[in-house]
Amino acid sequence: MKSSDAPTMKDVAREAGVSLGTVSKVINDIPVGEQYRRRVDAAIKKLGYQVNNYARGLKTNKTYCVALVMPSLHHPFFAVLVNELSKCLMEEGYRSLLMITSYDSQVEEKCFLLARQNKIDGIIALTYSPDLEVDESISVVTIDRHLSNHPCVSSDNYHGGELAAEKLIALGCKKLLFLQIGNVIVGEAEKRGPGFENACHRNGMTCHSIVLTDDETEAPFYQFLEEHIHNGKLDFDGIFCNSDGLGVRVCEFLRERNVRIPEDVQLIGYDGIVDYATGRYSCSTIVQPIAEMAQAAVHLLLHQQGDLMPRNISLAVHFAPGGTTRE
């Protein structure tokens, strides 16, 4: 082999001392003896052999490309999720085709159509359209939202709400408030509120809840808070917000009115968003296992089919302090 030539499968077979068919099986994940697999892998690494996915796709009827359909990258949760999904797919030898819908149901439909036209091998999506039509010939896994009979991966949102209530109560809070702004489409994330409320009632605590939808402004939250501040004190001493972003904005609003956090009011958000500049959590939070969610979604899409695919995978969450609770 000339030094200027790219190594071929024949070169790999010669280096490993195996047949060309054995090399093909290893590259295409067809079972072979472990000894042969190690020899082929070592030869590939030594020679720097690169799999030609285009030619590979012609033989296997695959494109080795998965579409990631997301509403936005402005929200840190979506950005981190896309990053983790792309990493997992790359480890499996797949490329990512990122499509941004801007929360528009019509754009979602176009993205799914474009994915089908490009003969991609599957879609991982976080959708906002309850009437989205999906070609049954395409494998789809969703995040947080349920879409017909396709599997859905999420964090354990109900337990996350319970965990927030139990933490605030354990830290001495007596008057609890839940604030949520979310989509009109019911999904796994909407379980955070019921989990919080039920844990409050179970512990003999009252809970006041305000729930808004994405098409509304947050003004009712701040009007309510303003009406319940007396002499620098809020009538509530524990707040759970259904996202870290909302939690940070509520903290800013209260601090501007000289309400001390966490001395007077303790607050917990949801997501586990880390501040890019400091590497710290934006507020005390219920942390979603985003890396594990991405791994589960990719595994379901690529390795489980038909009756073996569960309809919902709910992964464990945990609490992390972020300066808005008294630890």
Image (tube, rainbow, N blue to C red):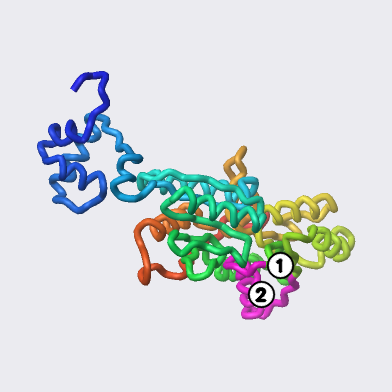
Q: Quadrant of residue 192?
A: bottom right
Residue 287 in picture, x, y percent from top left: 55, 57
Mark 2 in CB contact with mark 1 (< 8 angstroms): yes
Residue 207 marker: none
Residue 201: within the magenta? yes
Which kind of residue does numbered mark 1 sit on? Answer: Phe
Residue 164 in picture, x, y percent from top left: 61, 66
Which kind of residue does numbered mark 2 sit on? Answer: Glu
Q: Quadrant of the C terminus?
A: bottom right
Q: Quadrant of residue 220?
A: bottom right
Other residues around mark 1 within 10 Å, as few (<14) / some (14–19) / many (≥20): many
Secondary structure, mark 2, is helix
Which residue position is annotated with label 2?
A: 197
Residue 178 marker: 1
Q: Nearer the viewer, residue 92 or 293?
A: 92
Residue 124 in picture, x, y percent from top left: 49, 55
Q: Which of 300 and 58 is in front in this view?
A: 58
Segment colored magenta: 185-209
Q: Is residue 111 visible?
A: yes
Residue 299: within the magenta? no
Residue at 65% in and 70% down: 193
